[in-house]
Amino acid sequence: MTLQPDNPDALRHLLTLEGLPRAQLLALLDRAQHYADGRDNRSALAGTAICTLFFEPSTRTRLSFQLAAQRLGADVLNFDVSTSSTRKGETARDTLRTIEAMGVRGFVIRHHDDGAVAALADAAAPGTALVNAGDGRSAHPTQGLLDMLTLRQAKGDDFGRLKVLIVGDVRHSRVARSDLHALHALGAGEIRVCGPRALLPGDATLDGCVVSHDLDAALEGVDAVMMLRLQRERMDEGLIDSIDAYHRDYGLTSQRLRCAARDAVVMHPGPINRGIEITDEVADGPQSRVLAQVRNGVAVRMAVLEYLLAGRQP
Amino acid sequence: MTLQPDNPDALRHLLTLEGLPRAQLLALLDRAQHYADGRDNRSALAGTAICTLFFEPSTRTRLSFQLAAQRLGADVLNFDVSTSSTRKGETARDTLRTIEAMGVRGFVIRHHDDGAVAALADAAAPGTALVNAGDGRSAHPTQGLLDMLTLRQAKGDDFGRLKVLIVGDVRHSRVARSDLHALHALGAGEIRVCGPRALLPGDATLDGCVVSHDLDAALEGVDAVMMLRLQRERMDEGLIDSIDAYHRDYGLTSQRLRCAARDAVVMHPGPINRGIEITDEVADGPQSRVLAQVRNGVAVRMAVLEYLLAGRQP
Amino acid sequence: MTLQPDNPDALRHLLTLEGLPRAQLLALLDRAQHYADGRDNRSALAGTAICTLFFEPSTRTRLSFQLAAQRLGADVLNFDVSTSSTRKGETARDTLRTIEAMGVRGFVIRHHDDGAVAALADAAAPGTALVNAGDGRSAHPTQGLLDMLTLRQAKGDDFGRLKVLIVGDVRHSRVARSDLHALHALGAGEIRVCGPRALLPGDATLDGCVVSHDLDAALEGVDAVMMLRLQRERMDEGLIDSIDAYHRDYGLTSQRLRCAARDAVVMHPGPINRGIEITDEVADGPQSRVLAQVRNGVAVRMAVLEYLLAGRQP
């Protein structure tokens, strides 16, 4: 559904990490590390206009892309479709093509529907590049990349030696899917997934993963724990009994974290529900890489925007 | 009501196209064509602050002006009054004068009331320029200019040879009024207007036009068809029987378009109600100039902002 | 509650004017005057990202800071927390630290709770600077500074010779508190406060002021009148009888203004409730400095942002 619509060797859009060759992924991470080291590159996209087009609102993701674009010298425009009165029945495709006709070359798109960004990519003009900033439960490729960059900074290049655990609502998580695509591509040694049965997907998503419903057992000896955000709606939907029960069974506490390797790192895509997925002590503790993830987010987005847009005619 | 408040030979604001001399109009179109050819001019308004001040929201018009201002090197600020909590009972005039006192020199203003932008122009300080981005049903001068630019690109300089047809809700349309002002000024050979009686104005707006209620007849041999947007409220107001009936009688289909000249162009100010004013086949067909209009919108707004603001003290 | 959290001689944040040494205050005013004279300084904060983080909306204050930051060459981002759906239960502290991790160095924060900005300052990383753009009823330091700059422009350096009157809802006003801090620091000759009993604070706020409930008497011979905005909620809360009664007793009219010194100036932080705190005749009259205050606001904010952020590593 969210396959790259053209040759992944010459990425035109970034829609998913699924099927992205390992070499391409590593090249993006290398470039992101260059920016994570604090470098700006204000001339890279000077004169290029980039529009954030969010059909589902997310201020932090929008800000991260906006900062990335500014540090590359681009002009940034924001279009929050979810709060706009401009829709007036216009289709998403017409919205895209209209802003494209205004001279915008890069689009950062978030949409609540699976595959919506890929569908828009089909409608885009030849000179336009789209970045999927999250569609439905399908993919959030820049989050996957920033998670890999964070993991590599903490644990080095040899993914084959790593045991990584993903905890929580994988079923509804585009973050988890993009992380899984990237971990498979980088050849992670062991990928474990842990969560309540109702929150794990029944399809091929977990192929190649060790699945568990017991967090203490799953944590045993892992090098990294990637916690997922729990949407409170899951309780209303009857998928979990209560927030308290979820925290009791799947919340990461300092005590539990001792089951992991001594130097294991803890990650979370944010925003954190403190006391639910993760306690304050863990979120703010020495093993947390939550703020490093945010920091790396800007660097990864710089690398992606530069890769897709630099050198194109503005 | 929206007459230019000062000598049109030295335009201080752009409030309407009514009464604008042909030479002035052509000079703006020439400059817009220069920008439509892809040129930037980042130093033209460097250090000049421009504020979009929208009392009635419109994201696409705001984005178009914002891109135009950025390509001229201006600083752009957005003030969406309609969603702001800042109003707190402040008058529009006080809002304008406050932002003006902050050092903003250019204002792009949309307002739901006829004449509201002209009234604000009376309150503006000497160094300030206002662009009417649409007031009530009165005027939308940059839309009129971009339509003329699009028409000239398609049909050449000799407006005297052209038959142009405007279709739809002229009565409530500021776009139609600005188009009519511009077509008269440029000496269009024949201006036809077609729509249901209840949606055509009873005043002097249509003086000099050939009025018809039969679209097939009206299309006969025209060089350009300018479709207007239909607001769904017109049905609630009892001005049209139904959306279906409107489409049947006044919707532009491929079949109907064959009544026009073979190389006739189709225009629409957007956003399009597909299947109502116009079918997909026509909107996306070879005679459509809808995306060219959007593209020209940025170029026209660059020309207007530059004309009004360049060379002024920032 | 809003004491500066570190040595005021080396201000790291601007949280309040309380306790700010006179020399520091004058240095900021001198620098602001430099910018008020029309100078830009586009290289001062080039490459520095500043985020406006408003938990309580205020478009005019946001625009003023945004213009100040742009004229210093900074990148500006806006985060309107009050209308954002991004909160999703995230704490203000997590929001700050997240945006900080993205590389933002300066934060302009407005919050409805007293002391909220100081609490966020405690959470900020070493390289980050916060400007309080208004917290609860406690402080609005840049408003205090711009009022002092406006006063100095009108009346000269010798604050010891000045009689200044503050009129209205001092109890709920952060503007009044910051003005009082500044007037005390600058050694104003006489500070008078006038308002209905229910709208004057009962604590130490008015120490050193001459308090009155009779506006005509209070106006006698003053050099400057600082009117405060009246929130209409005060009527619902039973703190005033009616808007009309408030205007009759505490509204500034041309006639009343004759009680003041002949060259007295009138100030108001805006937005003005015309006909309530102040009549049109006074607001737009020759003694009004309302627009000068707005103009000085940008200059003061440039001085503050430059002071806190220039020379720091971006």
Image: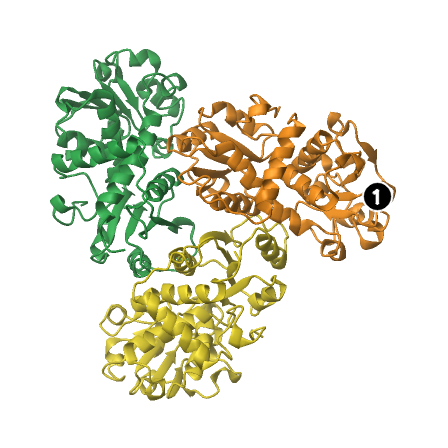
Chain colours: A orange, B green, C yellow
Classify residue A284 as left or right of residue B156: right
**Of residues C102 and C201, which is closer to you in this image?**
C102
Decide which of C257, C48 is in the foreground and name it: C48
Disc 1: CA contacts within 10 A as few (<14), some (14-19) or many (>=20): many
Q: Secondary structure at mark 1?
A: helix
Residue A252 as seen in the image, left or right of residue B110: right
Where is residue B297 drawn, in percent x and y? 31, 34
**Count of numbered labels shown in the rendering:** 1
Chain letter of disc 1? A
- On the image, the x and y values in percent for residue B143 come to 27, 35
Residue that badge 1 annotates: A219
Q: Is residue B1 shown above or below B87?
A: above
From the viewer's perspective, is B156 left or right of B88? left
In the rendered view, does A241 fall on the left or right side of A273? Answer: right
Residue found 16% across the figure and 33% down from its top: B26
**Residue B57 sits in quarter:** top left
